[in-house]
Image (tube, helix red, strand yellow):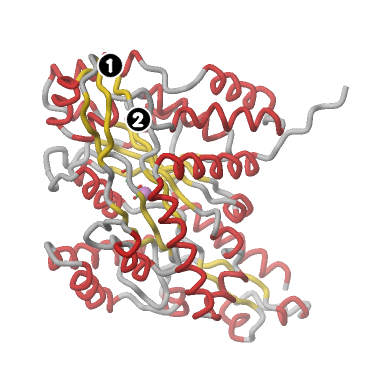
């Protein structure tokens, strides 16, 4: 008998991310409006900036632009987190990076499940920012216990999803038909539930401790709380949000607008108030789901990141309470210290680049030089910025806060615990910086070997 042919994990992820987007558009119609806005702004930006168009096309970024998005979920137990790790592996998504949000007053720590290889990222870079609630940080012993009991009773995965995850693991993949079943079953985990699993009183008690605790503990599953398309001009998209009926958060998070974008800029429309039926039939509301947009730039080296963190801290001291325009002006002044051209960032070792042969380089043979700078100067080699594929803890905290409606609180600060997170996950998280460094090195060696 011939072996059934197995689908690539990239294909499974692509199907899943599209199904997830369709589900979220049906659940949160404003997300559909946001996609329209981003699509329109992206088309306009590309036609106004032919050079950007050319560069994105050459880097293979254009093809993925319309499918590119990230989502976020929050779970309550180690068992849920480690099963999610296995679920995401079916789609070629692996835990990258450790984010401590306790620093910003949110009692969670997080990772991003995402593809890693160049090919996988080029096809569909779908990422899911995944947070684990840290019950150990909750002050009230009674509430902590109550939360643990409630969480112990739920299973956020369907039996079908569990079975197909195991099949993927033993078979080394899924057939096309199994993949479609998997997408349907896995989607159930991320679906919104209008019915809470607890009564209104319990919800209120948890909510009063921290809104996020109620969000994680009181429902059958970790509903996807936002999906985020990638825009090429976040300032323009933010400006137009109100025209299209969306209420944007006060400021765009991250670095200011630049000629050569770095890392990640993000903004969101505020979470919607949704009606909920609580156990015992009481009606109430819950606010959790929102929409976000992001603009991505080049990944920074540890040196670049240190400079970013330093300037961000300086900027934040001056921006408290400012509106977006004033906030961006302050940030632009502060970030004037960060070189704003690719060449300078590369030479100063601030950002990661991928090296390619130019057409001239492809025609050249046995150049016999191992000096990348000389090869660039001769027009044989070109360096292209590597896009940042990860997240930023301070920005993530800003996104959390604007949607939790709370002021920042220091109650949980200083509690990074990567070991505990990895133990819950059942695996180590990959260090994101080592991935960029590796991609840069591989491309450099490939270019040098071929000349
Ligand atoms: C996650 C917030 C973080 C981002 O883009 O930084 C995030 C959450 O609210 O669960 O998605
Ligand atoms: Ni997000």
Q: Residues within 10 Å of mark 2 (few under 14, many from 20)?
A: many
Along the polypeptide, which appears first: circle 2 or circle 1? Answer: 2
Q: Secondary structure at mark 1?
A: helix
Residue that numbered label 2 is attached to: 75
Lateral position of residue 39 relative to residue 247, left or right = right
| Front residue (pair 385, 350) | 385
Dot 1 alpha-carbon crowd within 10 angstroms: few under 14, some 14 to 19, many 20 or more:
some
Residue at the image point whose x is 38% and y is 26% from the top: 221
Residue 349: x and y in percent read 42, 70
Lateral position of residue 156 relative to residue 413, left or right? right
How many numbered marks, from 0 up? Answer: 2
Callout 2 touching callout 1 (CB < 8 Å): no
Relative vertical location of residue 1 with respect to residue 399 in this rendering, above or below: above
> Residue 264 location, x and y as percent?
38, 61
Q: Quadrant of the N terminus?
A: top right
Q: Which one is nearer the viewer's eye here, 102 or 156?
A: 156
Pointer 1: what residue?
150
Q: Nearer the viewer, residue 196 or 87?
A: 196
Does 64 sit left or right of 205 as displayed? right
Figure check: 286 above or below 218 = below
Q: Residue at x 64, y 64 (%)?
A: 445
Q: Quadrant of residue 177?
A: top right
Against 66, residue 217 (above or below) is above
Position in image of residue 192 (x %, y %): 39, 32
Residue 105, compared with residue 35, is above or below; it is above
């Amino acid at each position: 008998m011939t072996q059934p042919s197995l689908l690539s994990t990239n294909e499974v992820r692509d199907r899943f991310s599209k199904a997830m987007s369709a589900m979220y558009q049906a659940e949160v119609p404003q997300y559909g409006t946001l996609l329209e806005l981003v699509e329109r702004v992206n088309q306009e930006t590309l036609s106004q900036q032919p050079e950007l168009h050319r560069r994105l096309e050459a880097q293979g970024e254009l093809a993925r632009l319309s499918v590119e998005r990230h989502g976020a979920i929050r779970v309550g137990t180690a068992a849920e987190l480690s099963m999610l790790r296995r679920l995401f592996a079916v789609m070629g998504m692996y835990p990258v990076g450790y984010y401590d949000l306790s620093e910003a007053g949110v009692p969670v720590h997080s990772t991003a499940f995402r593809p890693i290889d160049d090919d996988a990222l080029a096809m569909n870079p779908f990422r899911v920012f995944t947070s684990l609630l840290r019950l150990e940080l909750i002050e009230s012993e009674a509430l902590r216990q109550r939360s643990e009991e409630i969480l112990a009773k739920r299973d956020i995965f369907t039996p079908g999803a569990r079975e197909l995850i195991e099949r993927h693991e033993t078979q080394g993949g899924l057939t096309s038909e199994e993949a479609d079943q998997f997408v349907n079953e896995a989607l159930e985990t991320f679906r919104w539930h209008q019915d809470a699993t607890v009564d209104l009183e319990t919800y209120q008690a948890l909510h009063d401790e921290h809104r996020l605790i109620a969000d994680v503990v009181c429902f059958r599953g970790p509903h996807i709380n936002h999906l985020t398309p990638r825009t090429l001009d976040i300032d323009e998209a933010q400006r137009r949000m109100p025209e299209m009926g969306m209420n944007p958060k006060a400021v765009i998070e991250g670095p200011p607008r630049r000629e050569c974008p770095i890392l990640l800029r993000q903004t969101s429309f505020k979470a919607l108030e949704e009606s909920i039926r609580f156990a015992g039939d009481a009606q109430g509301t819950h606010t959790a789901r929102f929409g976000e947009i992001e603009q991505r730039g080049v990944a920074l080296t540890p040196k670049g990141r240190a400079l970013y963190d330093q300037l961000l801290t300086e900027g934040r001291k001056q921006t408290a309470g400012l509106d977006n325009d004033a906030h961006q002006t302050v940030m632009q002044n502060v970030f004037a210290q960060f070189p704003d051209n690719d060449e300078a960032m590369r030479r100063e070792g601030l950002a990661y680049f991928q090296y390619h042969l130019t057409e001239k380089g492809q025609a050249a043979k046995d150049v016999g030089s191992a000096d990348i700078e000389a090869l660039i100067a001769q027009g044989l080699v070109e360096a292209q910025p590597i896009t940042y594929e990860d997240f930023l803890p301070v920005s993530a905290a800003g996104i959390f806060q604007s949607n939790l409606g709370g002021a920042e609180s220091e109650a949980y600060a200083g509690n990074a615990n990567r070991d505990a997170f990895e133990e819950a996950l059942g695996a180590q998280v990959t260090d994101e910086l080592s991935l960029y460094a590796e991609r840069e090195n591989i491309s450099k060696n490939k270019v040098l070997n071929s000349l």
